[in-house]
Amino acid sequence: MTRTALLVLLAASTAIAAPKRAPKKEPPPPPAPKEAEPDPPPPSPAPPPRTANQRIVGVLDVRVEGVPPEIAAQFQSQLEAQVDTKHFWLAPRSRMHEMMTNSTKWTEGCVIGSCLAEVRRQTQAELVLLAALTGSGTSFGYVVTLVRTDTGAVLEQKSERCDVCTVSEALANATLATVGILNNVPDKLPDAAHDQQVQLAQVQSKADVQVAAAKHHPHAVATGVLITGLAVAAGGAGVYFASKDAGVAMAAAGGGLALGGLLALTF
């Protein structure tokens, strides 16, 4: 074997014996960037500051049934845009419920009656608004009610239903009806207790005149007592429709006088 052949054979054997190198690994790709989460919807803008001439009207409840849920928010938005801001300060439903969370005496179901006194204490709202919008197929309707918080009594209510209309038309009509109710609110709310006192005073004054005229004769006195009793009893019947307790008491007193006068005439 020649020297050249020996060198070739040695080189070949060295190459075979040499360890094989592992293939170079490529680095892993960088992770894909996460998509940014959408920003939460902005909160409802706070109502402008209230002035001394504005009366607080709180949106206490807006119920929807058979119509898209967003109709409730649209109703409040349209009402805020159309209400007479010179005379009324509209407290949104969310704000009303937020303020009522501080109360331990109010529950979600209180929308009418004496329990509204707590709403008045917590929110200073003189009036609260209740609205309901319902629909089925092409028939939609609404009921809007304005309630006093001092007495819990309904001040005014309007309702309407159309057999063939759209939810947008019903929403617009409900908004206009609510604005109309607010525009009809008197500058001074009726004082039911004062009105009862005036009725009682008028009846008593009339009875006093009749008794004074009958004092000239004993027999006429009995007649006067009978007439007075009948007058007071009649007045009590009228007052009964405004206040059951006051009306019953007044009617009972008049009945007693009438009975006394009748006995006096008999004997």
Image: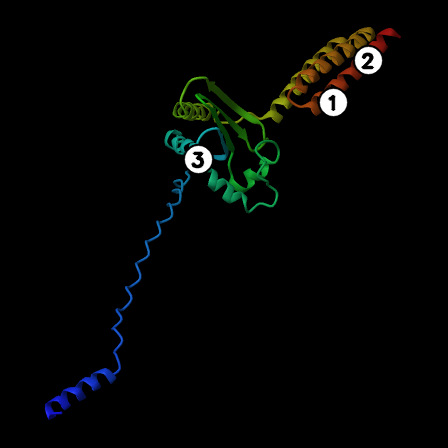
Q: Residue at x 55, y 30 (%)?
A: 148
* Residue found at the very far front of the displayed protein: 1
Q: In this view, does 79 lie to the left or right of 65?
A: left
Amino acid, disc 2: Leu
- Which residue is labeled 3 in the image? 90
Up the image or down, 184 lies above or below 261; here it is below
Q: Position of residue 130 (x, y in %)?
A: 51, 30
Residues packed near mark 3 inside 10 Å, few (<14), some (14 to 19) or many (20 plus)? many
Q: In this view, does 264 lie to the left or right of 53?
A: right
Q: Where is residue 200 in the image (x, y as percent from the top left)?
A: 67, 20
In space, the residues marked 3 and 1 are separated at their CA atoms by: 41 Å
- Which residue is labeled 2 in the image? 259
Residues packed near mark 1 inside 10 Å, few (<14), some (14 to 19) or many (20 plus)? some
* First in sequence: mark 2 vs mark 3: 3
Q: Position of residue 112 (x, y in %)?
A: 58, 31
Residue in front for this viewpoint, 254 or 109: 109
Residue in front for this viewpoint, 149 or 95: 95
Amino acid, disc 1: Ala
Q: Residue at x 12, y 88 (%)?
A: 5
Secondary structure under the numbered disc 3 in the rendered image = strand
In space, the residues marked 2 and 1 are separated at their CA atoms by: 15 Å
Q: Quadrant of residue 52?
A: top left
Q: Which of marks 3 and 1 is in front?
A: 3
- Which residue is labeled 1 in the image? 249
In space, the residues marked 2 and 3 are separated at their CA atoms by: 55 Å
Q: How many labels does the image show?
A: 3
Q: Nearer the viewer, mark 2 or mark 1?
A: 1
* First in sequence: mark 2 vs mark 1: 1
